[in-house]
Image (tube, rainbow, N blue to C red):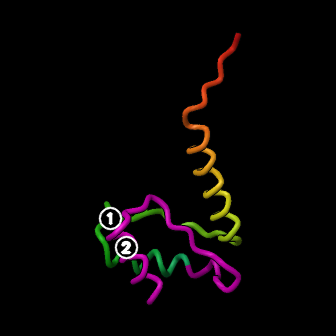
């Protein structure tokens, strides 16, 4: 299964804790087969949690906004007078 091979490559490079799959053409029912294929291919201590996201683009933008805000406000401290 091509998706499982791509995720194996991602694991080897990034070692993520979560992998989100989704999009308009992705069926949520496919996650079980992908997970089974990964369990057969990789050591269990390398496996990330496979998540389904119906709107992966929204999640991407939310994540980028969160990381950007963290960088911008990293040195800001709120003091109570």
Q: Which portion, as a residue range, is magenta? A: 1-30
Q: Which residue is depicted at the point 64% across and 83% down?
A: 26
Position of 1 with respect to 69 (left or right) is left
Up-down: is 39 above or below 1? above
- In this view, the residue in front, 5 or 65, is 65
As helix, strand or loop, the secondary structure at mark 1 comes to helix
Asked which quadrant contains residue 29, the reply is: bottom right
Can you identify the residue that label 2 sits on? 39
Q: Are marks 1 and 2 in contact (CB under 8 Å)?
A: yes
Position of 39 with respect to 70 (left or right) is left
Dot 1: within a 10 Å radius of its alpha carbon, few (fewer than 14), some, or many (20 or more) residues? few
Q: Earlier in the sequence, mark 1 or mark 2?
A: 2
Q: Which residue is depicted at the point 63% across and 46% down?
A: 69
Asked which quadrant contains residue 80, the reply is: top right
Up-down: is 35 above or below 72? below
Can you identify the residue that label 1 sits on? 44
Q: Position of residue 72 (x, y in %)?
A: 60, 43
Up-down: is 5 above or below 68? below
- Check the image and name the residue furthest to the bottom: 1
Q: Which residue is depicted at the point 70% across and 66% down?
A: 58
Disc number for residue 71:
none
Position of 64 with respect to 54 (left or right) is left
Asked which quadrant contains residue 38, the reply is: bottom left
Q: Which residue is depicted at the point 65% across and 54% down?
A: 65
User: Per the image, is 48 magenta?
Assistant: no
- Check the image and name the residue furthest to the left: 43
Dot 2: within a 10 Å radius of its alpha carbon, few (fewer than 14), some, or many (20 or more) residues? some
- In this view, the residue in front, 40 or 73, is 73
As helix, strand or loop, the secondary structure at mark 2 comes to helix
Q: Position of residue 34 (x, y in %)?
A: 48, 79
Q: Position of residue 71 (x, y in %)?
A: 56, 45
User: Per the image, is 8 magenta?
Assistant: yes
């Amino acid at each position: 299964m091509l998706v499982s091979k791509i995720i194996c490559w991602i694991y080897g490079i990034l070692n993520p804790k979560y992998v989100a799959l989704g999009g308009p053409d992705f069926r949520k029912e496919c996650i079980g087969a992908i997970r089974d294929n990964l369990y057969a291919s990789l050591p269990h201590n390398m496996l990330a949690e496979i998540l389904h996201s119906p709107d992966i683009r929204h999640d991407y933008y939310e994540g980028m906004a969160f990381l950007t805000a963290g960088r911008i406000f990293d040195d800001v401290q709120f003091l109570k007078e």
